[in-house]
């Protein structure tokens, strides 16, 4: 899987499966990629990653055919720009509170004529510092970057239809934990009221032809999301998968002794 193929699959409504990176280690990323995932999200909002970690992590992901995506700490243009210039192939923006904030975030991911657009620096890791093909880099970047906005607040739900019509949007990712907290439920994901809000949001986004994204803690949860038509799924978290594997191994050993 490469960045162009990921975009094509999303446009064709074909599901893609990835995971979250909270362990900023290139070897760990390579191991995860060898399992066959489509993408990995490096989490600068909740994870310990620094901007200096990113180039090696992106390289490790792409060496195993896994598309590197970065959740930036917030919607600030400079956060997005630094990740793009470091070589990420997708940007996930948290807490997009309304259509105006969504439009600003999308503008900052692409080269364009306004001050809201991505700033131009052609000699960065994203171009492999190639000063002989600057025009090709500028012309090709917009088509490679997957744009993901996160619906995590009540304001985003109110503006959902307007957000879905914005040009350049690839995925609307429903952040179930923060969304439940903003609705006063704080992680009560099985609450019938929350489930109605969640399924209604999925329907509204899908009706606009936009891919819906969501987190799944287990394969069973991922299958439920797929059955709902959700096509961009982050399956578990690297650290949690590591712990679970050792817990299962210890439990199996205990059952044998």
Image: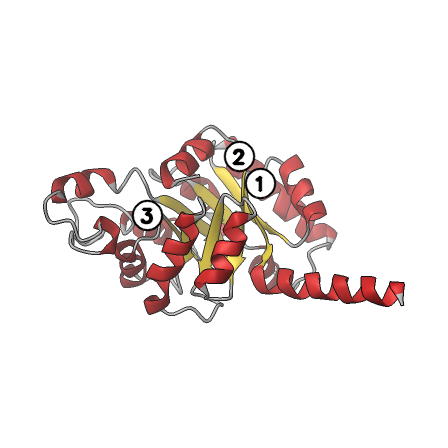
Q: Residues within 10 Å of mark 3 (few under 14, many from 20)?
A: many
CA distance for labels 3 and 2: 19 Å
Residue 184, by quadrant, is bottom right
Q: Is residue 81 left or right of residue 28?
A: left
Label 1 crowd bin: few (<14), some (14–19), many (20+), radius 10 Å: many
Which residue occupies 68% across, 47% down?
Answer: 219
Q: Secondary structure at mark 3?
A: helix
Q: Residue at x 67, y 52 (%)?
A: 194
Position in image of residue 69 (x %, y %) = 41, 52
SS type, badge 2: helix
Quarter placement of the C terminus:
bottom right
**Which circle marks residue 206 in the picture?**
2
Instruction: Pick whichever, 212 or 120, lies toward us.
Output: 120
x, y (%) of residue 195?
68, 48
| Mark sitting on residue 106 | 3
**Quarter of the image with the N terminus in it:** top left
Q: Position of residue 51 (x, y in %)?
A: 34, 67
Picture quadrant of residue 188: bottom right
View extreme (front): residue: 257
Q: Are marks 3 and 1 in contact (CB under 8 Å)?
A: no
Element under disc 1: helix
Q: Tell me if label 3 and label 2 are in contact, CB under 8 Å.
A: no
The answer to whether the residues at label 2 and label 1 have Cβ atoms under 8 Å apart is yes
Q: Nearer the viewer, residue 116 or 225?
A: 225
Q: Compared to 59, does 139 lie above or below? A: above
Residue 218 x/y as whole percent: 68, 51
Asked whether the viewer can see residue 117, the reply is no
| Label at residue 202 | 1
């Amino acid at each position: 899987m490469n960045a162009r193929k990921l975009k094509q699959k999303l446009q064709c409504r074909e599901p893609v499966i990835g995971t979250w990176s909270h362990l900023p280690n290139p070897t760990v990323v390579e191991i995860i990629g060898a399992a066959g995932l489509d993408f990995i999200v490096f989490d600068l909002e909740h994870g310990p990653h620094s901007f200096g970690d990113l180039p090696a992590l992106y390289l490790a992901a792409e060496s195993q055919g896994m598309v590197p995506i970065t959740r930036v700490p917030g919607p600030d243009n400079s956060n997005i720009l630094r990740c793009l210039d470091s070589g990420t192939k997708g940007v996930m923006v948290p807490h997009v509170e309304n259509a105006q904030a969504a439009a600003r975030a999308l503008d900052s991911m692409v080269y364009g004529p306004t001050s809201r657009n991505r700033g131009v620096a052609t000699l960065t890791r994203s171009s492999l510092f190639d000063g002989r093909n600057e025009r090709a880099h500028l012309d090709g970047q917009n088509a490679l970057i997957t744009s993901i906005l996160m619906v995590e607040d009540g304001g985003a739900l109110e503006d959902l239809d307007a957000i879905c019509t914005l040009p350049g949007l690839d995925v609307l990712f429903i952040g179930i934990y923060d969304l439940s907290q903003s609705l006063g439920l704080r992680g009560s994901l099985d609450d019938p009221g929350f489930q109605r809000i969640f399924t209604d949001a999925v329907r509204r986004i899908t009706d606009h032809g936009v891919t819906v994204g969501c987190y799944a803690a287990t394969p069973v949860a991922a299958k439920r999301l797929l059955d709902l038509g959700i096509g961009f799924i982050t399956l578990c978290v690297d650290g949690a998968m590591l712990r679970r594997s050792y817990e299962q191994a210890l439990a199996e050993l205990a059952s044998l002794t």
